[in-house]
Image (cartoon, helix red, strand yellow):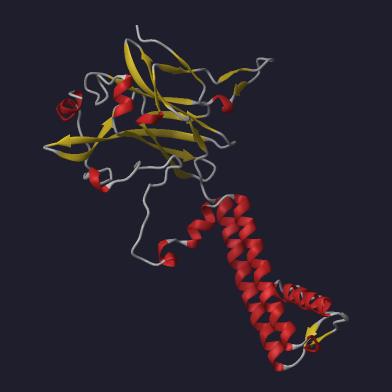
């Protein structure tokens, strides 16, 4: 593909992307669709490799509560085993007769101690049992503090609630072509001063060596005052664009990725939020255009934003 040899002469490259130049050291895409770097780290232990705090903030809500529930059940089960083998006679107030019921008595005493509820029907006697109960109560207090902090952090963390179109499109734009990506807010937040930045990463062969080259893409509009409806980000493919001259076949046969960075101000938290994603050339649809995704309601009193149509597009032709 002869056009690859002319790219560096036509387009300005960027060296501050944070990604390496040597293409032979890279596998797959630079960014995953969720915006996280496609990096797997080795050389350190599993506990050193991951921040459990950040992990607990990022996991889906159902996983977060499932982890809390499993931790609660497992800890109380272990302490119940300890109380049971010490002898339930050291738990004054137990009324169970069968061994199974005795274990459940120990389990529920453990849960009451862990949460510091302490109904008072069952109480420990003896130094060993009392010491274990006191230690469990301390663990319960610390656990409650950590769980409460994590829960508060999840609710209070400023987040850019943005959805991106599943594909990037090469569509007609004025008298030329344009690279188009669509995004929209999907929660009842108000984002202002939204800024977009696109970077094109491609693998180019220079002097018999494959290198990663990154090109900032100029946009039709880099900033909007308020992000309330959908926003179609457009990169006009002019003669200065690194994508100038690309055909549908070139997108299929070239290793490239379009990296999207969005930054906006969330006035609810008075904080800046960011969001990222990327599109490989395999996710670029040539000769297509987005369909409208918002319209007035039947009473003509409000605008309806159909988030389910974020990636709706139609095939077009270039005249």
Q: Quadrant of the C terminus?
A: top left
- Name the spot of residue 24 as percent of width and height, x first: 24, 45
Height in image: 297 above or below 284? above
Does 126 sit left or right of 36 as displayed?
A: right
Question: Considering depth in this image, is 223 or 314 the residue closer to the camera?
Answer: 314
Q: Residue at x 35, y 10 (%)?
A: 318
x and y, in percent, of residue 232 in the image: 44, 24
Please tell me which residue lies in front, 281 or 131. 281
Res 221 quadrant in image: top left
Residue 120 in picture, x, y percent from top left: 82, 79
Residue occupying image coordinates x 71% and y 71%:
115
Which residue: 59% across, 51% down?
Answer: 155
Residue found 49% across the figure and 30% down from its top: 227
The tally of labels here is: 0
Residue 78 image position (x, y, % from top left): 66, 76
Q: Where, quadrant-wise, is the N terminus in this rendering?
A: top left
């Amino acid at each position: 593909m002869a056009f690859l040899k002319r790219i560096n002469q036509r387009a300005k490259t960027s060296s501050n992307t944070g990604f390496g130049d040597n293409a032979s050291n890279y596998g797959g895409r630079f960014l995953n669709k969720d915006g996280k770097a496609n990096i797997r780290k080795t050389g350190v232990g599993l506990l050193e490799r991951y921040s459990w705090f950040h992990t607990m903030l990022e996991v889906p809500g159902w996983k977060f509560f499932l982890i809390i529930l499993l931790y609660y059940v497992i800890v109380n089960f272990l302490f119940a085993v300890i109380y049971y083998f010490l002898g339930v006679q050291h738990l004054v107030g137990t009324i169970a007769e069968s061994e199974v019921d005795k274990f459940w008595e120990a389990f529920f005493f453990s849960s009451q101690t862990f949460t510091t509820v302490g109904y008072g029907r069952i109480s420990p006697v003896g130094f060993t049992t009392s010491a274990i109960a006191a230690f469990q109560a301390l663990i319960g207090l610390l656990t409650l503090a950590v769980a409460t902090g994590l829960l508060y952090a999840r609710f209070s963390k400023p987040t850019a609630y943005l959805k991106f179109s599943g594909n990037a499109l090469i569509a007609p734009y004025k008298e030329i072509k344009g690279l188009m990506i669509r995004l929209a807010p999907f929660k009842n937040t108000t984002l202002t001063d939204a800024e977009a930045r696109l970077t094109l990463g491609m693998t180019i062969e220079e002097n018999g060596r494959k290198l990663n080259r990154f090109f900032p893409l100029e946009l039709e509009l880099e900033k909007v005052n308020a992000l309330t409806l959908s926003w179609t980000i457009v990169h006009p493919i002019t003669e200065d664009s690194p994508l100038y001259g690309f055909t549908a076949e070139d997108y299929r046969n070239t290793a490239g990725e379009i990296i999207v960075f969005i930054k906006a101000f969330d006035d609810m938290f008075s904080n800046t939020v960011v969001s990222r994603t990327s599109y490989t050339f395999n996710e670029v649809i040539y000769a297509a255009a987005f369909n409208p995704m918002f319209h007035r309601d039947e009473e003509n009193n409000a605008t309806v934003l159909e988030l389910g149509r974020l990636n709706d597009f139609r095939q077009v032709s270039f005249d």
